[in-house]
Image: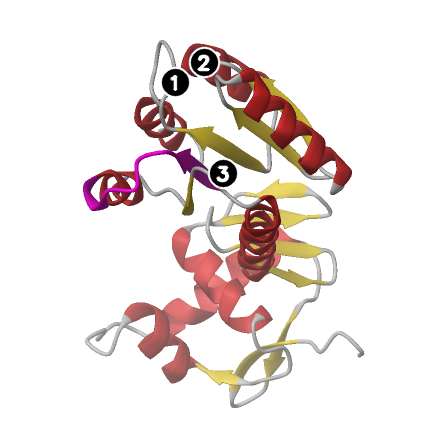
């Protein structure tokens, strides 16, 4: 169940949003001002923030700016101000969308659904999985059986290259051009050295040597 933080100071609108969102299958938490919103946001995870612009204590712009300093959680801003400058200011703070009051609940629900679907697809696309390995391409983290691997930037790129195309053979020249650049004039054995270190850290035979050609990740069905 997706969790939504509703930040709205008008009780009637709070109740309307809470009722409709919960009926649509979302779990909701309500904050009536900017300070309470930030306190709640820091205390638990949320999948989306529904953020009113005109709030007591800290306005929506301020709340958005502080959230963005620590998270890229989707933010859908509610506002009675439909001027271009207000909207541009919000988008400069990296909000996901605007809804202008008075708003249609079906339209709001559809915007929420689209934002969450888009964000879910983005997060899924940012992770590459192969057997019991997971590469997070945004955080540059590699996990083996859920445990973090300490890889250098070059080792991570090598692993990413192999796992993105299991079974494809990469020559040393191809790997040098891709990861070291065409202006690299060093010894090709630098590739062998990095492969050796990567294999040692993996502790498993996930990278095959194709004799006389190069390297590849073993296909998952082999």
Q: Could one spot residue 31 in this view of the protein?
A: yes
Dot placed on the residue nearer the N-terminal end, 1 or 2: 2
Question: Mark 1 near mark 2, Cβ–Cβ under 8 Å?
Answer: yes
The span shown in magenta is 74-85
Name which residue lies at 53% across and 21% down: 41
Q: Nearer the viewer, mark 3 or mark 1?
A: 1
Could you tell me which quadrant the N terminus lies in? top right
Mark 3 sits on what residue?
73
Question: Mark 3 near mark 2, Cβ–Cβ under 8 Å?
Answer: no
Tell me the SS state at disc 3. loop
Q: Which mark is residue 55?
A: 1
Name which residue lies at 49% across and 11% down: 36
Say left or right for 217 vs 97: right
Mark 3 surroundings within 10 Å by alpha-carbon count, few (fewer than 14), some (14 through 19), many (20 or more): some
Tell me the SS state at disc 1. loop
* Residue 178, image quadrant: bottom left
Q: Which mark is residue 33?
A: 2
Q: Which mark is residue 44?
A: none
* Residue 27, image quadrant: top right
Dot placed on the residue nearer the N-terminal end, 3 or 2: 2
Q: CA distance from mark 3 to mark 1?
A: 20 Å
Residue 145, compared with residue 61, is above or below; it is below
């Amino acid at each position: 169940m997706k969790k939504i933080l509703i930040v709205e100071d008008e009780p009637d609108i709070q109740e309307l949003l809470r009722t409709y969102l919960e009926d649509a299958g979302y779990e909701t938490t309500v904050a009536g001002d900017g300070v309470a919103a930030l306190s709640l946001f820091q205390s638990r995870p949320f999948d989306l923030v529904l953020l009113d612009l005109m709030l007591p204590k800290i306005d929506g712009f301020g709340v958005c700016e502080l959230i963005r300093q620590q998270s890229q959680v989707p933010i859908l801003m509610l506002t009675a101000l439909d001027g271009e400058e207000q909207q541009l200011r919000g988008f400069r703070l990296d909000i996901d969308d605007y809804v202008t009051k008075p708003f249609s609940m079906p339209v709001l629900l559809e915007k929420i659904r689209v934002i969450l679907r888009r964000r879910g697809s983005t997060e899924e696309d940012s992770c590459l999985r192969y057997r019991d390995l997971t590469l997070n391409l945004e955080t540059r983290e590699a996990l083996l059986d859920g445990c973090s691997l300490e890889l250098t930037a070059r080792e991570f790129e090598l692993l990413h290259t192999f796992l993105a195309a299991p079974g494809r053979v990469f020559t040393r020249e191809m790997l040098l051009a891709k990861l070291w650049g065409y202006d690299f004039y060093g010894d090709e054995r630098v590739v062998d050295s990095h492969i050796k270190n990567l294999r040692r850290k993996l502790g498993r035979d996930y990278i095959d040597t194709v004799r006389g050609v190069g390297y590849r990740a073993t296909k998952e069905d082999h």
